[in-house]
Image: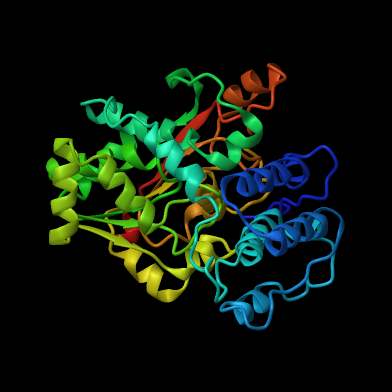
Amino acid sequence: MTEAAVIRSDVPGSFARAVFHERHPRLVDDVLAALPYGARQRAELERLLAESTAGVLEPLPEDAPDHAEWLAWGEGLWGRPWGAAPFLWAESYFHRRLLEATGYFGTGVWRGIDPYGPLKAAELAGAAVDGFGAGPQELLASALWGNRADLGFRITAGEGPRAGTDALVADDSAAFWSALERGRGGRVCVVADNAGPELLPDLALIDHLLEHGLAAEVALFVKPQPYFVSDATMADVLAALGRLEATAAGRRLRRAVEDGTLAVRTDPFFCAPLPYEAMPAGLRAEFAGAALTVLKGDLNYRRLVGDRHWPPTTPFAATTAHFPSPVAALRTLKSDVLVGVDAATLDRLDAAGTPWRTSGRHALVQVDGAADRR
């Protein structure tokens, strides 16, 4: 299959350019309002904004713990404008540099402090702990539309109306449940996206899989450190479990963590600026044994299919053949990349004249259940 052009942020009027020139400045304002950072950190954040919008890419400091990795990942990019880098790479590097600017990896008192922590906590405190639906399809829908709970996206997009099933641009829900039935009693991997209001229905779905025998065990993968604003870490899983502790599902989930049937896992790769095709052998082996891997959200989708200008009718399976297990994507549309949509749906949505690919008001459930990977 011929690969499509990589998405970059140097195209005037593009969604990717708006992320750097509109979303990121507002994000920095929110971070500075949330925590009392000092003058040095504020200056570093302002320098990051200036560099990422009008400057050139500079490597991490030599004493950064992942200096060598990023130096290799950015080979051929250092000293060039940020817009010359692939959008996925540049956006990832921006969030890594934000951690550097706030002292997350430093030796002072701000070491290990999540710059998005207060934003996440406020979202979780206001989230309902029920209403996810009792039936399988309702649980799936809650997990799918929970993906709209993305603080980075909502900085510029606003809430908007909650979309319904008619807003699905691709719906492989039946294939999703069929893949789980075929692998009944096996291991399911869930790669989380956002914390708080998205993680709660994700956990409710995991509880259903365990309670009804669709999975004997679930591996929930989270980020090893703060990443794209509201991305879930282990601290966010613990906070979500605490929010659910008064519910029967919350009590079952806690026992599942304690006995290992729900294992929370991570890997440095989840904060790398690379597609899943480049995942390390150890992580590939973990996914390879799964009856199904469920990837949540927009960023995981971009990394799965490749952050490229694919023709939208490109079959989903044509872009996921590299993945080592049957795989499902649950995603609300918040960026340009898209595959697996039929021509009639495209014509209907394009005729409306709205930015439907990036508004968060449409979603998809896509499944590649290829049995030869099991």
Side of 186 where 145 appears, left or right: right
Side of 272 where 197 appears, left or right: left
Picture quarter with the C terminus: bottom left
Q: Which residue is more in the foreground, 7 or 270?
A: 270
Residue 24 x/y as whole percent = 70, 47
Q: Which residue is more in the foreground, 267 or 318?
A: 267
Side of 260 where 230 appears, left or right: right
The answer to which quarter of the image holds residue 130 is top left
Total marks drawn? 0
The answer to which quarter of the image holds residue 61 is bottom right
Residue 365 x/y as whole percent = 43, 36
Q: Which residue is more in the foreground, 79 or 233?
A: 233
Residue 5 x/y as whole percent = 73, 52
Q: Which colour style is shown?
A: rainbow
* Above or below, comparing residue 362 to residue 81 in the picture: above
Picture quarter with the N terminus: bottom right
The residue shown at (68%, 62%) is: 41
Residue 313 seen: no
Residue 10 x/y as whole percent = 82, 50
Side of 65 where 13 appears, left or right: right
The residue shown at (21%, 46%) is: 182
The answer to which quarter of the image holds residue 334 is top right
The residue shown at (52%, 69%) is: 109
Residue 112 seen: yes
